[in-house]
Amino acid sequence: MTDIMTLKTQASELRKAGKIAEALSLYETLWTQYREECSEWDCWGYAWCLRKTGRSSEALAVCREAYKDYPDFPNLRSLYGWCIYDLYIKRDDPEIQQDEANFFKAANAIVQLTTNEAYSPYVRTVFKVLDYLKSRPAYPAAKILEWTDKLRPEELSSEPSPFTDKEGNSREYASDREKWYSHRTKALFKLGRYEECIRVAEEALASITKFHHDNDIWFRSRIALSKARLGDPESAIAEMESLLARKKDWFIHHEIAQLLLEMDRTDEALNRGVEALLAPGPSDLGFKWELFLLMGRIFQKKGDMEKARKHVLLAVKVRQAEDWRIPQELSEAVAEMGVDVADPVSAEDLHRELRQEWKAMKLSQMPHAQGVITKLVGEGKAGFIRGDNGQDYYFKVQSFRGPRDRLKPGLRVQFYVEKSADPSKRDNAVFIEEIGD
């Protein structure tokens, strides 16, 4: 017995000293020759060393065997969970999709084995599941809500996680608490639990001091849209308009257009929908299929069925290009409008054609002006124009239609005026062209 105790002591001391390979050799002897004499710490130490040397599969087998004798030992349960995490959770989405059932089986096993404690895989597993679910083409709101129920925001870290990107720049990931609120509020809104969505989003705005990925804008937009669904669309539109002063993005215009259409303000909805289509946003057209469908509904309401069909067809084509299923609301629009989904036109070609129409529609609603470029700023990326009316306009260089070497102070130009979302700032000059002699 003394020899066994000496072996146990030596293995433990080597492990603590970081001599993992030497400790592993002794633990293996204990496990194979003196299994009945092994304590919970010996079993844990053996599995721990196996995992540390990249042998998670063998470590998992040891944990499963030891768990039969020591099911309540916290260290063993945590290590058991980490081994499952290594083998079945720590995967890319395409790999998970090949065996999704096993992924969820493993995730459920981890949350049953472990708790939200330091050095536990519990929180990391829940967020891995949430991130995977969020990426699915058909957003599974109920499932996401179920997994957010497994965490309490007050127990999650509020500290952002620093990292260095590929260019060597210091960046930050959102804190676990911020991510939880983001997942939770979106799921609540999708499920129509609007009052709860407002409460949780307001809680997020009050408890988080630094936001990432424009989450504060998302929280405020969900509050506004929840109010609209609860019968107050006017205040929702006003709140969404205020967000444009901070972020002139497509999804805000999209939501306003949707609200305007629901209020039978069709012409306003059309103008706002065009703003959404031309505003900055993701390059992947698949993210905008709902906007294309909305435009189809707007043109249908206006009686322009040719344009309505084109926009609905674009929504279908971008989903087909992503190999996504056609949802019911899109199928209904196809049937109602008699859209020929067998049309061989590609999503890219149809988008290119419609984009020219969107630009023409936008320009028809904008004031036209002339003036002179007064200066360039921001290392030549932007500048100012003094209009013939005496007003100054801000512009970005990419709005100039002509050779960049012609863009200099003193150049006389014509342009369209885009109203600034922030009343305190100058209006913008867009679609700028040089005026010839």
Image (spheres, rainbow, N blue to C red):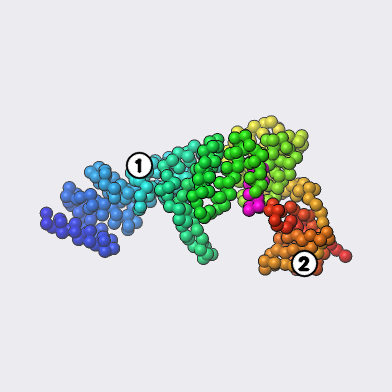
Q: Which residue is mark 2?
A: 374
Q: Secondary structure at mark 2?
A: strand
Taking the image as shown, residue 28 lies to the left or right of residue 228, namely left
Mark 1 residue crowding within 10 angstroms, few (<14) / some (14–19) / many (20+) = few
The residue that appears at 46% across and 57% down in the rendered structure is 161
Q: Which residue is mark 1?
A: 112
Kind of residue indicated by mark 1? Gln
- Residue 231: within the magenta? no
Residue 421 percent location from the top left of the image: 69, 52
- Residue 254: within the magenta? yes
Labels 1 and 2: the sequence-earlier one: 1
Q: Secondary structure at mark 1?
A: helix
Please state, as top left, top right, bottom left or bottom right, where the C terminus lies in the image: bottom right
Kind of residue indicated by mark 2? Thr
In the image, residue 17 sits, relative to residue 189, either above or below, namely below
The residue that appears at 13% across and 57% down in the rendered structure is 3
Mark 2 residue crowding within 10 angstroms, few (<14) / some (14–19) / many (20+) = some
The residue that appears at 20% across and 50% down in the rendered structure is 39
Asked where in the image residue 227 lies, by quadrant, the reply is top right
Asked where in the image residue 390 lies, by quadrant, the reply is bottom right
Tell me, yes or no, if residue 292 can be seen here. Answer: no
Magenta-tinted stretch: 243-256
Q: CA distance from mark 1 to mark 2?
A: 67 Å
The residue that appears at 51% across and 60% down in the rendered structure is 171
Q: How many marks?
A: 2
Residue at the far right in the pictured view: 437
Taking the image as shown, residue 322 lies to the left or right of residue 50, namely right
